[in-house]
């Protein structure tokens, strides 16, 4: 029988998997962010749970209040880092890699199971997210349209830094997967016109992802927003998994257009079930619906679109039903 690591790869490739369950069970676990092991670059550039108003290595003000599953930027006119995009070099100071806390990583994760479980590291603050972290959402959207050359240059420099960061992470931890975080839209549409995204953002992903693939590492793109218009671009970029695909998107059409070259992970409507009023049975019924609706299409793995839920009982109910009903589904269809 396949190990969890081997079976996940089979699911990802739509290549005769042996069982279906909670996909995060196939990964070495992190108490803060379940499926991804925090590396030294991540630890040096994010807030910690419970911190509010803390500045990261870029000078961006972040909030991670108790009960929230992750950090969010708190950008005002007074604290935004880039105040004039034409002169962004005056404001942006790239963190160095000289004193990364690798000893902390080694202490946090002393017994990683590389034989049976996958090792995934996160790469938070993707290219689009970096732009609005540094100047605020309104300025970023305006500058993509009014100052495209300056935005292109900023993201080019940031991508150079991300490639160097990836080199340190891969050299030290040798991950199987890097999960790159960049939400490109909301539950209704993309934030940028596809032509703008392709002109200003895509070329830098090509370089960054090209480096990761050259090192033999799989790419999992976290993006829990409507982005179906970019699915062919994701294939072009070598993305192996789009994690966070929403049921509001055309999942069936995306799978057909990408011809099995892009594994979709997600399918859950989290606001519907990740709330105080959803009962355990409501959550488990939704899990069964996602499996029955999307698994027959192939190139699909059901999972929490937001990676982890806001309410812990939701994580637990999804976990239990993915394993219980997933086993039934696998017995009947695999």
Image (spheres, rainbow, N blue to C red):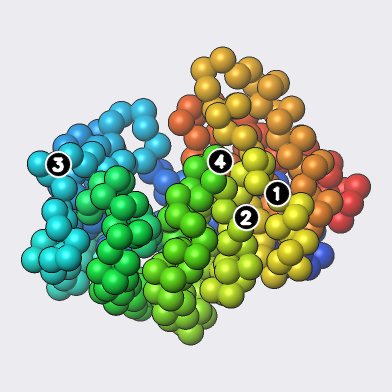
Residue hosting label 3: 77
Q: Earlier in the sequence, mark 1 or mark 4?
A: 4
Disc on the earlier residue, 1 or 3: 3
301 horizontally vs 170: left or right: right
Whether residue 26 is visible, yes or no, is no
- Name which quarter of the figure residue 325 lies in: top right
Measuring from the top left, give residue 156's x and y in whole percent. 30, 74
Numbered label attached to residue 250: 1
Q: Residue at x 19, y 72 (%)?
A: 97
Instruction: Give the secondary structure at mark 4.
Output: loop
| Vertical side of 43 occupied by 164: above or below | below
* Residue hosting label 4: 188
Q: Which residue is mark 2?
A: 228
Relative vertical location of residue 22 with respect to residue 170 in this rendering, above or below? above
Place of residue 247 in the rendered image (x, y in percent of width and height, measured from the top left): 67, 41
Classed neighbour count for the residue bearing mark 1: other residues with Cα under 10 Å, few (<14), some (14–19), many (≥20)? some
Is residue 242 visible to us here? yes
Helix or strand or loop: what does disc 2 sit on? helix
Residue lying furthest right: 332
Q: In screen coordinates, is 298 left or right of 115?
A: right
């Amino acid at each position: 029988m396949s190990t969890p690591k081997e079976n996940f790869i089979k699911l990802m490739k739509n290549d005769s998997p042996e069982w279906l369950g909670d996909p995060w069970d196939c990964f070495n676990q992190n108490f803060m962010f379940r499926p991804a092991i925090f590396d030294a670059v991540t630890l040096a550039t994010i807030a910690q749970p419970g911190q509010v108003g803390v500045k990261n290595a870029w000078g961006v003000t972040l909030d991670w209040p108790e009960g929230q599953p992750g950090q969010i930027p708190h950008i005002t006119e007074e604290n935004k880092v880039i105040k004039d995009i034409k002169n962004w070099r005056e404001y942006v100071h790239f963190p160095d890699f000289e004193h990364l806390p690798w000893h902390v990583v080694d202490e946090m994760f002393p017994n990683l199971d590389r034989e049976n479980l996958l090792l995934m590291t996160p790469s938070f603050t993707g290219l689009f997210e970096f732009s609005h972290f540094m100047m605020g959402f309104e300025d970023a959207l305006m500058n993509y349209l009014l100052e495209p050359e300056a935005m292109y240059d900023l993201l080019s420099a940031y991508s150079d830094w991300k490639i160097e960061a990836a080199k340190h992470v891969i050299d030290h931890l040798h991950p199987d997967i890097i999960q790159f975080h960049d939400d490109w839209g909301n539950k209704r549409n993309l934030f940028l016109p596809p032509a703008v995204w392709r002109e200003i953002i895509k070329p830098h992903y090509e370089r960054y992802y090209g480096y990761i693939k050259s090192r033999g590492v799989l790419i999992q793109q976290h993006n829990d927003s409507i982005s179906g218009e970019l699915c062919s671009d994701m294939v072009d970029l070598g993305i192996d998994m789009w994690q966070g695909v929403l049921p509001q998107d055309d999942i069936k059409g995306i799978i057909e257009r990408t011809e099995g070259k892009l594994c979709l992970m997600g399918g859950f409507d989290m606001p519907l079930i990740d709330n105080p009023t959803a009962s355990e049975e409501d959550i488990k019924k939704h899990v069964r619906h996602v499996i029955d609706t999307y698994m027959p299409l192939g190139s699909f793995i059901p999972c929490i679109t937001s990676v982890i839920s806001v309410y812990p009982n939701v994580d637990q109910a999804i976990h239990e039903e993915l394993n219980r009903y997933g086993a039934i589904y696998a017995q009947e269809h695999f």
